[in-house]
Amino acid sequence: MTDLARATSILTIDVEAIVANWRLMAKGVAPAEAGAVVKADCYGLGMGHIAPALYAAGCRTFFVANVDEGLALRKILADGMIYVLSGPPPGSEPDFAAHGLSPVLNSLSQIAGWSAFARASRAAPAAAIHIDTGMSRLGLDEAELDRLAAHPEVLAGVRPVLVMSHLACADEGESPKNAEQLGTFRRLAARLPAMPMSLAASFGAFLGRNYHFDLVRPGVALYGVNPTPGRPSPMAQVVRLQGKILQVRDVDRPMTVGYGATHRVTRRGRIATVAIGYADGWFRSLGGRGFGLIEGIKVPVVGRISMDLTTFDVTEVPPTVVHAGAMMELIGPSHSVEDVADEAGTISYEILTALGRRHHRRWIGVPAEGKHA
Amino acid sequence: MTDLARATSILTIDVEAIVANWRLMAKGVAPAEAGAVVKADCYGLGMGHIAPALYAAGCRTFFVANVDEGLALRKILADGMIYVLSGPPPGSEPDFAAHGLSPVLNSLSQIAGWSAFARASRAAPAAAIHIDTGMSRLGLDEAELDRLAAHPEVLAGVRPVLVMSHLACADEGESPKNAEQLGTFRRLAARLPAMPMSLAASFGAFLGRNYHFDLVRPGVALYGVNPTPGRPSPMAQVVRLQGKILQVRDVDRPMTVGYGATHRVTRRGRIATVAIGYADGWFRSLGGRGFGLIEGIKVPVVGRISMDLTTFDVTEVPPTVVHAGAMMELIGPSHSVEDVADEAGTISYEILTALGRRHHRRWIGVPAEGKHA
């Protein structure tokens, strides 16, 4: 029996849609460049399949979170710029050089460490400098930039080719914080040598041209999440999650469902048990709040989510379509990642990054030239 | 540079503690047998390292969630009983036989499918039969057992060697549901041919000897979670999670921290940014509610959790111990998986199963004989 036929849950990732989303973003921000954020294994969707397809489409600048992700990406892509957002842990600088990884330098100490390495090795990759404009998370603050401006020798050997920052409220288009960060970014970047600049990620790309600078860094929008909240999504749907129905139970007397016996069935009906649970990234907070779809009919989660199983009330669905072996759609065109995030009380990013476990994953629309890039 | 030195987060799994927990459980339930639930990659902690150690300690009965997990376990363990809890998807029966996997039969249709296969192949592994006593999730209900009793030929070829059920409220020792399920289990199991019985998992094992029957199926307790809520845990701590501090920021003027600018710092202080975020299974719901420890000092999460980063208020910690490159302890002896679960608004099981991603994982205390079992 094939893996797919045996699978109790299937996560389908439309790589063609990801590529289409990247092209749309690239066209929208031109003449600025569109890179791609592929950290966390492309938000859980499979860097090994997605990064080569993006490269084949013309993407040449990639962002990962840490060195290990950078090393994994370099094995996939011989060419292309790879920025490591967390910068080099002390002592890891030779790994960056050996594999052509560009650090994002987030602090004076990272700059000092990289400078020392670069001066000694003379073959250090180019780097980015990260300015904090309001996240208070990573990046140089104003006082550090002042010290850097006063001691330019600290940058000796460093080849900075990008100055970047990150918006805290880009998903709230009306927030005054965005214009405030934009102004701070311009003001602080001016204290560094002139170089290409980057501020916007997926949501920031839709705040206006003045947020684009030289490079936009889309991530979540590539993976199908709407970067224009409150308006129809310009992005193609990427993810489909289906779980196999293991059993359909007729309820003909009052009974409780699931752990803690929190859900009590009082009328006659039917419960379908699906082979997806919180160990599959189907959040426990969806208990009593989530939904699935079968043949287009929306059916509610009842009771608590188990580690490997979720129960749905399928009383309204004809028995001919809801039976053991049929697939329940948990994420798809009619039930987006954002919908699931709302039901789970979190954001689409967390749903995506939690998905990549245990499901049988299949990638569709992988371009032929992308397979061996 | 070694992987460990380069790692921005480290998940340490004490295999010796898991083995000690299994031995404690085995001793406590004797003469009943103690199996081990190793589904979801041993709740995210690494079946490849843990299952052989449990086998070396004497465990001979293992439970996984689905066929793929069973196939993976059989590659690790040539010997030992492997039960697949979700049963055989139609058509997968030959995979079970080829790899010596025993299905847990959850419905009349699974029994019928297995019986047809077993009669044709004559080499089918033994099976378990699952009775639903109050989860309404998987398992035969009373009506199905009646039909089975009326048509015993349905079991032709099936070699049932275990009848099992699952408690809904075992973590609430005082719940009347436990005794009710115990009674239902005895009553319904009597309609089947006499065979070994199993009802209790980790929490159920501590409800009393009458819950032990012939086989207990501990899972989460093996991995260090307290199966006796409200009382000191008899289990050894298994998991330690550490994240590298990437940057420590002095805050000397009012500023906001993180996405949404939800946290505003008004007094002077210091913020440490640690390289763990929700893509690492460090739940976003810990934003503004979680804690870390550095040199034994508890420090609160401030602001929202990012995908790859978490910010902590480290104002109270001497600058000599909190600096870039130092490790922050997120889970450990003083901050258990249960503590994190409370802070995240979920249960320890979900914290565990979400952990096994992206961290550098190291397994300590792996017995020599376990490495090649």
Image (cartoon, coloured by chain):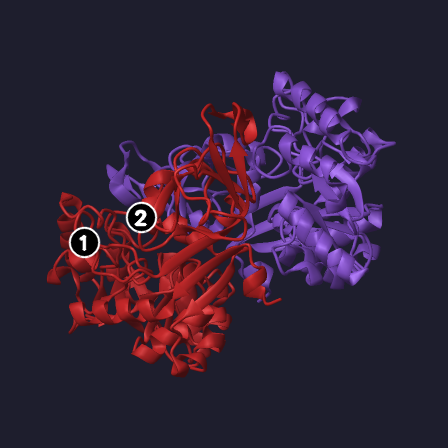
Chain colours: A purple, B red
Amino acid type at mark 1: Pro
Q: Of A142 and A200, which appears nearest the observer? A: A142
Q: Which mark is residue B206?
A: none
Residue at left offset 43%, top offset 64%: B113
| Chain on which label 2 sits | B
The answer to whether residue A33 is left or right of residue B281 is right
Residue at left offset 83%, top offset 37%: A195
Q: CA distance from mark 2 to mark 1?
A: 12 Å
Give the answer, above or below, for where A314 lies relative to B143: above
Image quadrant where residue A182 sits: top right
Decide which of tag 2 and tag 1 comes sooner along the chain: 1
**Relative image position of residue A43 (x, y in whole percent):** 61, 46
The answer to whether residue A147 is left or right of residue B266 is right
Amino acid type at mark 2: Glu
Co-location on one chain, circles 2 and 1: yes
Q: Of B270 and B61, which appears nearest the observer? A: B270
Task: Estimate how packed mark 2 is, as few (under 14), some (14 to 19) or many (20 or more) residues with alpha carbons within 10 Å.
Answer: some
Task: Estimate how packed mark 1 is, as few (under 14), some (14 to 19) or many (20 or more) residues with alpha carbons within 10 Å.
Answer: few
Residue at left offset 19%, top offset 56%: B185
Q: Which residue in the protein does label 2 denote?
A: B338
Q: Which residue in the protein does label 1 denote?
A: B232
Secondary structure at badge 2 equals helix
**Relative image position of residue A96 (x, y in whole percent):** 71, 58
| Chain on which label 1 sits | B
